[in-house]
Structures are given as structure tokens and as C-alpha cells.
Image (spheres, rainbow, N blue to C red):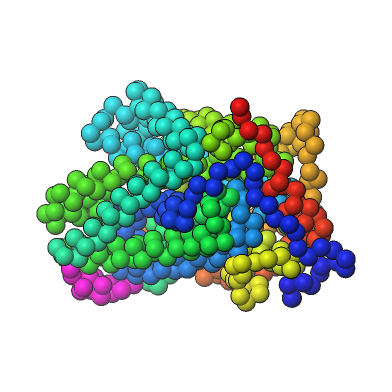
């Protein structure tokens, strides 16, 4: 199917694109890149090398490579879209252009919910890592750590700090984030160099069961189970801040693709350094039994085993800095998603109100309140990781369809960054997103479904009760969303691990003990991806509606606070 097929005669084939008014464009090329790198290198890097090794052994090296390739496909499609439409909160606004209000709200709500959970989770991670030195912050309950006593004040204070920094303007945020990212990069590179210098046992790559001790399938199992996919999802920040960078055509592709490539190289080298740095006596019981007693993290534990005490202390400090920086970044992301939902007329227009520094300050306040709500005594911050991965994958998928739809709706639109191969890369990106949803398992996806259903209740109430003129729901154009998600949830359900399955055994299974495993699931998902992709192409909005959305939404300038 060619890019212009299905375009009605006489319909516009391009639209006039204008940037958001009132938003400061203080994010330069490196700062935009570092919003992605800083979000990718969060609390997970301190544990990912161990968890991936336990599941896949030395083959975990390939898990990081495959995970990076999957995320790169998704990053490619958003690079094309973000350069065409450099607006704030693009992940939410792009589906609105091609498929209307229902599709954009569906993906936008789940994206906002997931992003809103990241900052408080990273706050909890910071506090948990600090627990050995400040036990008054948290209370251990059945192996988990819950905020208690004065810890509540610290948690709220950290949320307030991140909110305040974001409210001061994107320039302040970017400069601070640049400093923290340089710190995190320096620590990781230092860890890699020290591990290679102090202990290098290449025999670990082939002995103790071989390169794939648990089978080749565990290479893919480790991608969701060890947090590999979650670690890479921070690339999205190049999209969210595209409307606030000084040269989107140059900076956005550089940031989206560059953040994944840089961190992939780092993570692969770190995994190799970890695997080859392990003393041979620790692997006598096999990779699945590899453990460290060090509570500050396995990398610090390995540093102590190797006698590099100063490195262990440095890693303990970084265990506070890394999640803190990620929390700061996602405080800004959540704010921009609220702004984007309102600009789509799917949320109160007050969320678009800017302060003198060009920041949507009411959106910042909403992020703070909702973030504090997440501090209620749930089992632990780690329980949310799977939910966030699944929810972000759901929110990424619509963009893969928008690229194909836009080529049919606005074929003559200027595309400074255009993907080759027609529908091939968007389809591969959509397939990758669907795999991430499937791998998250039903026990996680059912929580995501509940969150989405709550969002639909909010959507109905807003459209019924608001006095503001809301756009048409355009359910037909967005009808692919519930059909697609219902199919993915069904596949997830039949690929789930049974409740009686031991957790350590479940990690090594390829998709659980249900009738649909990783191999069969991937085949079904490939077919499902193609069917939904072309169904979405068939029900997409007509070209004139798309052109009106592109021209109207960005130029509908928000009010500025006095």
C-alpha cells in the first residue's frame, strides 16, 4: 500500500505546523539527549546485571542488545513524528491527529498514569537505598520496605523539591539534569573499567553450563523479567520535550536514537564486566543461584568481594543519585503529559496555564498531588515496575500506527527525518511494543486494564459535565484501540504463570506455563500486529480532519499566569 493510497480526492495532503506558544525553548541538543540518558540510567542499572545473569547466564549480554534493537524501532517512528510536529507531550498528541479524541485519550491516560507513578517510585527507591543509614525512613514488612514515621515528610519533601525544580523552568531543570547525568555516566564507566582491571575471567562466558545455560529462550525472557526493557523506556523524553528544544529537526532524532545507542553500549559492557568479573567460586551452583548479601546492590556486593571497598561506597552514593535524577526527569514528563491531554481538549484547560517561565504550573501541582497519593502503603515500589513497563508499551504502540496513517493522510507533509521501507519499520515497532505488553504477564496487565477503565470513567464524566467545547469522540477512528488491547490481554492471560508457580522457576520459563509460550506468542502477536495495523489504516480520520487538528491544536495558545 503506497503512502497516498486512501487519500480522498481534493483533500489536503499537508498542514501548516506551528509550535506551542508561550513555551520556552531552552533545551539544547545535549540537554535533550541527557533527558533520555538520565531517565534510562535510573535505579535499575544497579540490579539489572545480576537479574539478567541469573535468568540467562552469559547470554544476558544478548538480552541487552535485543532489547535495545526493539526500543530503537519504537524510537525511529517517534523521531519521524517529533520532527514533523515538535510539540510538548507528543506521545499523547500524535494519536489525536490521526485517530481523534478516543484513541488519544486511551493512550494518553495510561501514559500519564504510568509516568505519574515513576517519580514517587524513584523517591521510594532513594529512601530504600538510604535505609541502612537512616532506618527511621522506612519499616520492613515481610521483606518489603514501607514509608513510615518521619519518612513520610521526607518523601513529600522530595516530591516538592522535584516539582519546584520543574516549576522554575526547563532551563534550570536541564542544567541540573546535565550535571547529574554526567555523574551517572562517570560512575558506570568507572565501574566497568575497575571490574575489567581487577577481575577478568573469560572462562565464565563458556563454562558453568555454557553461554546459554538455561536455553536460548531465556535471552528473550530476561528482557522483561530482568528489567532490560524498563531500563530503555526513558528514551521517550526526547519526544516529550521536543516542543522545548531550540532545533527539533536536528536535536530530536539525535536524542531519541542517541540515548538508546549510548546506554545500550554501556549496559552491554557492564554486563560483560559483571559476568567476567565474578569469582569462579560464586558460580559453583550455577547462574540461577548467583546471589549477593550486600543490600546496597549486587554491583556494590561484587566490589566488596573483589576487595574494592571504595567502589562499593561510591555505588552506595550513586544508588541515591541515580533514582533521584530519574525522579526529577519524570516529574517534568508527567507535567507535560497533563499539558498535552488538555491541549487535546481531553482534560481541563487549566492544565495548560503557564507561569512566567513557560511551565504549565497547574500540571506541576497535579503531578505533586497525585505523586504523593502513590505513597500510600502499597507493598513496595518494585511492584510498580512491571505495571509501568506494560503501560508505557501500550502508550508507545499508537505512535507506530500514526506514522503509517500520516503517510496516507498527509503524504506531502515535510518530513525532515523520514523512515525508509514504507510500513516495515512502523510494523516492527508496533510488534516490539506488543511483545513488551505480552511479556509483562497477565498479573501485571490486569492492573493496567483496571487503570484504563478508571480513565474511561473520567473521560465520560469530563465530556458530560464540562462546559468547555470538547472535540468529537471519533470512536470509529479509534475503534482499533479496544480491539487491539483486548486481543493483547487475551494473549497475556493465556501465557501467564499459574499462582502456584515458584517465582524463581517462573523467571526461567518462556512466557509462563499457560498454553501460549514465548515462541507461539511471538508468532500470534506478529499476525495480530499486522491485522490491527491495517485495520487502523482503514478507519483513520480523513485528511481534512487531520490537517485541522495539526493546524489548530498547537496554535491554540494557553493563558499565561500573571
* Res 57 seen here: no
193 versus 367 height, above or below:
below
147 versus 61 height, above or below:
above
- Quarter of the figure with the C terminus: top right
Instruction: Estimate the x, y position of residue 165 in percent, counting from the top left.
Output: 44, 35
Q: Residue at x 65, y 43 (%)?
A: 21
489 versus 356 height, above or below:
below
Instruction: Estimate the x, y position of residue 361 in percent, counting from the top left.
Output: 56, 32
Q: Which residues are magenta?
A: 200-214
Residue 181 covered by magenta stretch? no
Residue furthest to the left in view is 307
- Quarter of the figure with the N terminus: bottom right
Instruction: Estimate the x, y position of residue 396 in percent, counting from the top left.
Output: 58, 56
Instruction: Estimate the x, y position of residue 314 in percent, counting from the top left.
Output: 21, 47
Q: Quadrant of residue 483?
A: bottom right
Q: How many labels sit on residues?
A: 0
- Give the left or right position of residue 170, taking residue 211 as reference: right
Residue furthest to the top in view is 149
- Give the left or right position of residue 507, taking residue 5 as reference: left
The secondary structure that most of the magenta stretch takes on is loop
User: Which residue is nearer to you in this view: 226 or 497?
Assistant: 226
Q: Quadrant of residue 153?
A: top left
533 versus 96 height, above or below:
below
Q: Residue at x 35, y 62 (%)?
A: 267
User: Which residue is nearer to you in this view: 17 or 394?
Assistant: 17
* Res 196 seen here: yes
Residue furthest to the right in view is 10
Q: Residue at x 64, y 60 (%)?
A: 84
Q: Residue at x 71, y 65 (%)?
A: 413
Amino acid at each position: 500500500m503506497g503512502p497516498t493510497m486512501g487519500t480522498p480526492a481534493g483533500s489536503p495532503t499537508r498542514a501548516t505546523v506551528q509550535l506551542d506558544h508561550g513555551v520556552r525553548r531552552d533545551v539544547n541538543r545535549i540537554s535533550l539527549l541527557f533527558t533520555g540518558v538520565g531517565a534510562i540510567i535510573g535505579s535499575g542499572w544497579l540490579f539489572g546485571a545480576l537479574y539478567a545473569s541469573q535468568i540467562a547466564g552469559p547470554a544476558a549480554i544478548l538480552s541487552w542488545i535485543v532489547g535495545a534493537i526493539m526500543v530503537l524501532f519504537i524510537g525511529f517512528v517517534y523521531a519521524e513524528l517529533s520532527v514533523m510536529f515538535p510539540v510538548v507531550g507528543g506521545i499523547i498528541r500524535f494519536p489525536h491527529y490521526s485517530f481523534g479524541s478516543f484513541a488519544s485519550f486511551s493512550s494518553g491516560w495510561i501514559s500519564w498514569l504510568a509516568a505519574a507513578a515513576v517519580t514517587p517510585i524513584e523517591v521510594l527507591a532513594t529512601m530504600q537505598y538510604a535505609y541502612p543509614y537512616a532506618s527511621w525512613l522506612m519499616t520492613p514488612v515481610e521483606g518489603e520496605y514501607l514509608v513510615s514515621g518521619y519518612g513520610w515528610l521526607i518523601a513529600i519533601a522530595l516530591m516538592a523539591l522535584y516539582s519546584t525544580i520543574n516549576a522554575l523552568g526547563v532551563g534550570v531543570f536541564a542544567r541540573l539534569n546535565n550535571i547529574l547525568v554526567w555523574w551517572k555516566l562517570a560512575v558506570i564507566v568507572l565501574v566497568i573499567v575497575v571490574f575489567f582491571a581487577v577481575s577478568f575471567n573469560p572462562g565464565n562466558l563458556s563454562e558453568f553450563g555454557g553461554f546459554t545455560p538455561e536455553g536460548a529462550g531465556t535471552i528473550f525472557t530476561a528482557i522483561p523479567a530482568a528489567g532490560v526493557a524498563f531500563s530503555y523506556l526513558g528514551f521517550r523524553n526526547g519526544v516529550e520535550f521536543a516542543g522545548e528544544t531550540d532545533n527539533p529537526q536536528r536535536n530530536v532524532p539525535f536524542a531519541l536514537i542517541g540515548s538508546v545507542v549510548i546506554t545500550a553500549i554501556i549496559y552491554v559492557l557492564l554486563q560483560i564486566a559483571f559476568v567476567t568479573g565474578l569469582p569462579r567460586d560464586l558460580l559453583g551452583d550455577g547462574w540461577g543461584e548467583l546471589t549477593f548479601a550486600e543490600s546496597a546492590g549486587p554491583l556494590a556486593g561484587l566490589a566488596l568481594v573483589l576487595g574494592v571497598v571504595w567502589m562499593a561506597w561510591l555505588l552506595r552514593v550513586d544508588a541515591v543519585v541515580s533514582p533521584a535524577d530519574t525522579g526529577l526527569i519524570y516529574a517534568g514528563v508527567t507535567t507535560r503529559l497533563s499539558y498535552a491531554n488538555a491541549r487535546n481538549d481531553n482534560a481541563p484547560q487549566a492544565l495548560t496555564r503557564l507561569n512566567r517561565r513557560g511551565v504549565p504550573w497547574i500540571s506541576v501541582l497535579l503531578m505533586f498531588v497525585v505523586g504523593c497519593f502513590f505513597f500510600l502503603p502499597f507493598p513496595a515500589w518494585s511492584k510498580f515496575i512491571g505495571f509501568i513497563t506494560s503501560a508505557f508499551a501500550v502508550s508507545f504502540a499508537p505512535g507506530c500506527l500514526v506514522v503509517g496513517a500520516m503517510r496516507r493522510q498527509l503524504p506531502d507533509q515535510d518530513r525532515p527525518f523520514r523512515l525508509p521501507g514504507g510500513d516495515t519499520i512502523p510494523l516492527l515497532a508496533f510488534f516490539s511494543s506488543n511483545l513488551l505488553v505480552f511479556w509483562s504477564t497477565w498479573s501485571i496487565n490486569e492492573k493496567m486494564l483496571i487503570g484504563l477503565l478508571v480513565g474511561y470513567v473520567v473521560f465520560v464524566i469530563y465530556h458530560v459535565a464540562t462546559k468547555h467545547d470538547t472535540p468529537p469522540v471519533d470512536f470509529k477512528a479509534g475503534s482499533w484501540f479496544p480491539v487491539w488491547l483486548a486481543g493483547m490481554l487475551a494473549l497475556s492471560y493465556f501465557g501467564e504463570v499459574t499462582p502456584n508457580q515458584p517465582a524463581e522457576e517462573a523467571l526461567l520459563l518462556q512466557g509462563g506455563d499457560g498454553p501460549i509460550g514465548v515462541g507461539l506468542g511471538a508468532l500470534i502477536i506478529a499476525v495480530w500486529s499486522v491485522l490491527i495495523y491495517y485495520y487502523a489504516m482503514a478507519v483513520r480520520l480523513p485528511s481534512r480532519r487531520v490537517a485541522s487538528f495539526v493546524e489548530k491544536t498547537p496554535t491554540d495558545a494557553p493563558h499565561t499566569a500573571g
